[in-house]
Amino acid sequence: MANLEHTFIAIKPESVQRGLVDEIIKRFEQKGFCLVAMKFLQASEDHLKQHYSDLKDRPVVAMEHHSSQ
């Protein structure tokens, strides 16, 4: 059996607000990807801090933008 890879895709809040989720998913499927799960959530500040922890000492971190939606 072939090894399967899993990829995480995050869709930005602006794309959700603009109603582009279906189009984004369709484009991945047209490229041969298979959607196996989907979850919508509004990330908390703690979640974003953990997600971007490797960038915390860098000059720019996008947490304010993502947590303000």
Image (spheres, grey):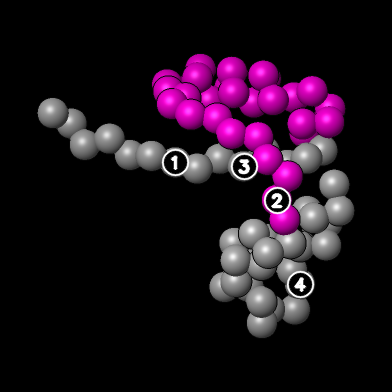
Q: In the image, is residue 19 part of the stretch drawn in magenta?
A: yes
Amino acid residing under circle 2: Ala
Circle 4 residue: 60
Figure disc tally: 4
Circle 2 residue: 43
Dot in front, 2 or 1: 2
Provide residue 61's location: percent of width, then percent of height: 74, 68
Label 2: which secondary element: loop
Q: Earlier in the sequence, mark 4 or mark 2?
A: 2
Amino acid residing under circle 1: Thr
Circle 3 residue: 10
Q: Residue at x 33, y 39 (%)?
A: 5
Circle 1 residue: 7
Q: Earlier in the sequence, mark 4 or mark 1?
A: 1
Q: In the image, is residue 33 part of the stretch drawn in magenta?
A: yes
Along the line of sight, the residue nearer the viewer: 35 or 59: 35
Q: Earlier in the sequence, mark 3 or mark 2?
A: 3
Provide residue 66's location: percent of width, then percent of height: 78, 53
Indicate whether 13 appears above or below 61: above
Would residue 65 be visible to someone looking at this image? yes
Q: Earlier in the sequence, mark 2 or mark 1?
A: 1
Q: Is residue 33 left or right of residue 15?
A: left
Per the rendered image, the range of residues in magenta is: 15-44
Q: Earlier in the sequence, mark 4 or mark 3?
A: 3
Dot in front, 3 or 2: 2
- Answer few, some or many: residues within 10 Å of disc 3's Cα (few below 14, many 20 plus, some between 14 and 19): few
Label 1: which secondary element: loop
Label 4: which secondary element: loop
Amino acid residing under circle 3: Ala
Q: Residue at x 50, y 19 (%)?
A: 29
Label 4 – label 2 distance at C-alpha: 19 Å
